[in-house]
Amino acid sequence: MKTLDERRWIYGGGLSPEWAWVVKRRRELALEALARIEKQYAKAAPAGVRKRRYAAGMRYFLKTKSPERDRLAVHPCFDYWLDLHARHFGAPAQESDWHLQFGLFQSFPAALALARGDRLDLDATADPDGRFFFYGTPKFLQAAPRAELSLAIAGGKLAVNGKPARFETLAEAVPGIVADDRGWLMVHGVTMHGLVGLSEAERERFGAVLNQAFRDLAERDPGLHAEMRDMVFSLVPLKNPVEHGSVSSSYVNLRGAIALSHAEDPVLQAETLIHEFCHQKMNQLLVVDPVLLPGQGGQVFYSPWRADARRLRGLLLGAHAFLNVARYLATSLSRETFPEAQHIELMVNVALRLNQVEAALKALTGYGAFTEFGRRFVMGMWSETELLRHAILWFPPALLEEQAAVAAAHRRKHALGDTGYHKSAEHVDKVRRAAFLAPKEDDAPAAKEAA
Amino acid sequence: MNVKERDEWLKALGACFPNLTTGAMSSACAAVAEEGRWEASVRGGELTAAGLRFQPARRGAPRLDATWDLTTGRPIGGAPFSPAAPGRRVRFKAGLFGEPALDKVIADFAALCPVDSMVLREVGWSLVLASPPRWPLFARCDIAAVFTPSASQLALFLLDRRVSELSFDGEALWAHCGG
């Protein structure tokens, strides 16, 4: 496949051949990276590490070509494991780090052998919190921190250090997507917001609201829902320390994991899922097309969403995510009856998002240089933004005007004039401007002086 | 001599940096009676210095390279006139520095803003741009990140002027802008 169709990437395009091709490319890159690591391990691992049967797990995983293996190779923890290796094994590492890194890897071959009913004997290491996960399943073992584990797998059964395994399980929001507040490889990289450990009842509630959000998504945006079910493996609960509506994050080295706080409102949870998933989807798309040509991270631009600035890539991801959110909310408004206050709140949300997306697209098209696909993608987003304006023609005009004014006020405060540049807090406008007939109060001091 | 171009830069400098004592410099500038190109220069990092540069058309003619300390408003250094800075001009190609990280940044930059040639000096270097990009488009490039802390301030001074050359003087990156 050579040419990507931008239309299927702007909104959810479902599990199309193009989607499968991008996932395949990501998987190939992950397996190539693992093959390189295996070679390096054979050459450089300390003797004490090589005594343990870590190489057996890597070999088994690399040679067992199967749909189960292919799924595991795009698991977020696989992403994170490769990233940890890249960050820590470029320079000489301590023996204990080798045991942790390669002992944790055994989660993948062990899960694969269990799923396939293969026979596999290997050595593994429990994570620093004393758990050992079987990725792609909700199962895990409880052990001592960094415990050495000897695993014997056959016929779908597991013995640990000679005894039948006693599995514990994570809750699933929907089949195949776990609510994971405990996996070390999963939560170690979640750094933007505080993690929260949930009680059993809280875990259940966290999963139940998300389950409802997924069911709504399946009905209102089946394409996006299908992609999400294919890519996302884990939902990590976050703390919401100051009772914001919601806090959430996702990471380029944890593709397939979404971190979000609990909320009782399934529409809010769906909005958060869509937002973070769109970032994940774009991060996955990067393996075949960068959209923005490389080397454009030098400048900070006005962010229509916050007081701080964004690079061009941030504007691209933000515009894409909020366009999807706005469309989902507009669809929800037309399909469901909400209490009046929530109805208005959702209309306000859609109207504000549309103005913000337009502001981001303005800066992107004004300053960015794109790949051929990237140009089509951004032009396509402009088109979809315009079409969404039609979809909300029934909104009260006063509400639309109010939200346009809110967006304009934000722009006046944080953008440099009407450009896409961010106006820093330290910015002092001392430039003498051309005089105008009736300078306004908020004109620069120098302009008043000149007048 | 393009007197209007020179005066335009002096005016822009004076408007944006009211502390500058440009009087003496104006006289010095007036003494340059050669055909050439006037450029403003800005230094990366915190916005602490700016300059005015005259690139004579005639080889070997005196050039002017005046810089101001923006905090005190006073000129930096001694006599602003100097012979053309010695250096070896080479056709630009990727990987000239032999430092992978720097070469990558410059290769990415050259893909966005084609580079004509490079001047290698004992201390520092210059990249002469083939088709000078306008400042707002130059500033998006990774190599321009050193100007980010003062982006909004510089945008008022440089407007949409073109960046003709980048130079590194051993301490800081400078961007030289034409009309």
Image: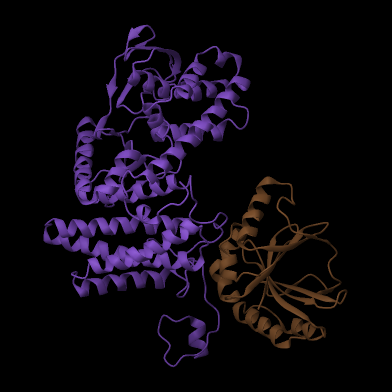
Q: Quadrant of residue A346?
A: bottom left
Does residue A425 sit above or below A70 in this rendering?
A: below
Q: Residue at x 48, y 35 (%)?
A: A28
From the viewer's perspective, is A76 left or right of B151? left
Please say whether residue A311 is visible from this viewpoint: no
Q: Residue at x 30, y 34 (%)?
A: A197
Q: Residue furthest top?
A: A162
From the viewer's perspective, is A451 left or right of A408? right
Q: Quadrant of residue A173?
A: top left
Q: Position of residue B144 (x, y in %)?
A: 61, 61
Residue in the foreground of this view, choosing between A293 and B23: A293
Please say whether residue A437 is visible from this viewpoint: yes
Q: Residue at x 49, y 50 (%)?
A: A289
Q: Residue furthest front?
A: A1
Q: Colour of chain A?
A: purple
Does residue B30 sit above or below A343 in this rendering?
A: below
Q: Residue at x 33, y 51 (%)?
A: A275
Q: Position of residue A67 (x, y in %)?
A: 37, 29
Residue in the foreground of this view, choosing between A232 and B91: B91
From the viewer's perspective, is A147 left or right of A273? right
Q: Residue furthest bottom?
A: A437
Q: Position of residue A311 (x, y in %)?
A: 49, 58
| Colouring method of the image | by chain
| Chain letter, brown in picture | B
Q: How many marks?
A: 0
Q: Quadrant of residue A141?
A: top left
Q: Position of residue A398 (x, y in %)?
A: 21, 75
